Image (spheres, grey):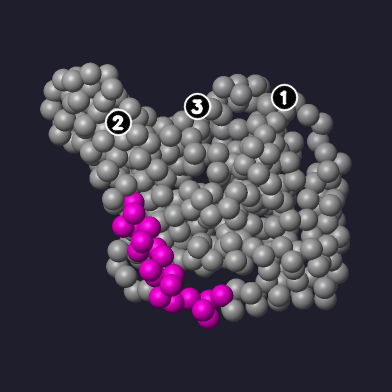
Amino acid sequence: MTAKSKSRALGGEELERFGAELDALRARTVATLGQRDADYIRRVVKAVRYIDVAGRALLYVGAIGGAFVNWLFWPACVLGVLLIAVGKILENMEVGHNVIHGQYDWMGDPHLNGKTYEWDIVATSENWRKTHNFRHHTYTNIRGLDDDIGYGLLRIFPEQRWRPFYLLQPLIAPLFALLFEWGIAIQDLKFGRLFAGKTTLRKMKRALSAVGRKMRRQIVKDYLIFPLLAGPFFLPVLLGNVAANLIRNLWTWVVIFCGHFTTDVETFPKEVIRNETRGHWYLRQLRGSANIGGGRLMNLMTGNLSHQIEHHFYPDIPANRYAAMAVEVREICERYGQHYDTGSLPRQFGQVVWRILRHAFPSRPRLRLRLEQAVAQRA
């Protein structure tokens, strides 16, 4: 059963009212943006800085103390790694992702400008603005237009054409999770075009240059400079930085996949954007997203992407507002008979895992896909 089958069909005027109510919620929220929101994001930025400093200090203390004194210092290393990972998660998700969306451009703060902010990850913010801000948020879950559907590696939906390569995705998916920042970094390069002969090696090298510079900068920072500061204790600090990045990558992958690939999430044919009204656009975002329950700590640690539905509705609204907006969004959806997909992290992640395992194998095309194709042919 899909989100569409759980939802009531909306007629033209009703669909227009549905979109108008969600637009009105946006307008009311924008009208109240101010100092409270500016203070919030600046507190998070400051917290990221302090958490990172504390984490790195504990990692050095644990590495040096563990070598000179005894093994009792090693828990300091573990705590240091966890703090570094938490700092990176907050910087990437609550600060970087949201700032790059332009959520805080109204502040006029050059350090929080969505067009110039560069985050602590091997992917460039410029490429992310193209692959995520534009392609994903414009063409959410539209097959052939949204590159985030499986990220070119995974078959998540039965509408995706099956290939023998997908038999490996139960092994590829966890590896992709651990290396997620690298997958995001090369997403816009589309190496498949090179292998298919649709671009040249020279053009690919030119496209890789900016990404390569960012990768080198991150590698030097995390895997050379910080470990070298530990002197002869280079190795444990290096391993600590590697572990922190892997934790950050895994958590980010889980959050993003739980927001896009649960059981009720749908994909759409390209034809849906023909004469798409505002109400239709909201329905597509609703049926292509899922939320994660969990309260304030979950909201903070996911960059408020625990409210993926609200984020898809309002990507340029400060994410700290999503929890309050979600109350009204859910009420509007219930009033119009629309399924609002939300659940705990274990529940949503379990559905993601099942999709990955199930669609690694061939499956019959759904009747809905055949109907979509028939409608497209008549259009």
Front residue of 379/233: it is: 233
Left or right: where 240 falls relative to 291: left
Q: Which image quadrant is residue 39 in?
A: bottom left
The answer to if 36 sits in the magenta stretch is yes
Which SS class for mark 1? loop
Nearest to viewer (mark 3 / mark 2): 2
Q: Image point 30% across, 29% down: which residue?
A: 77
- Image coordinates of residue 377 in percent, x first then y, are 82, 52
Which SS class for mark 3? helix
Residue tagged 1: 361
| Amino acid found under the numbered disc labelled 1 | Phe
Left or right: where 274 falls relative to 122: right
| Amino acid found under the numbered disc labelled 2 | Ala
Above or below — where is 154 with respect to 374?
A: above
Q: Which residues are magenta?
A: 29-48
Residue tagged 3: 175
Q: Which image quadrant is residue 357 in?
A: top right
Which SS class for mark 2? helix
Quarter containing the C terminus = bottom right
Q: Residues within 10 Å of mark 2 (few under 14, many from 20)?
A: many
The answer to if 377 sits in the magenta stretch is no
**Mark 1 touching mark 3, by CB under 8 A?**
no
| Amino acid found under the numbered disc labelled 3 | Leu
Mark 3 or mark 2, earlier in chain: 2
Residue tagged 2: 76
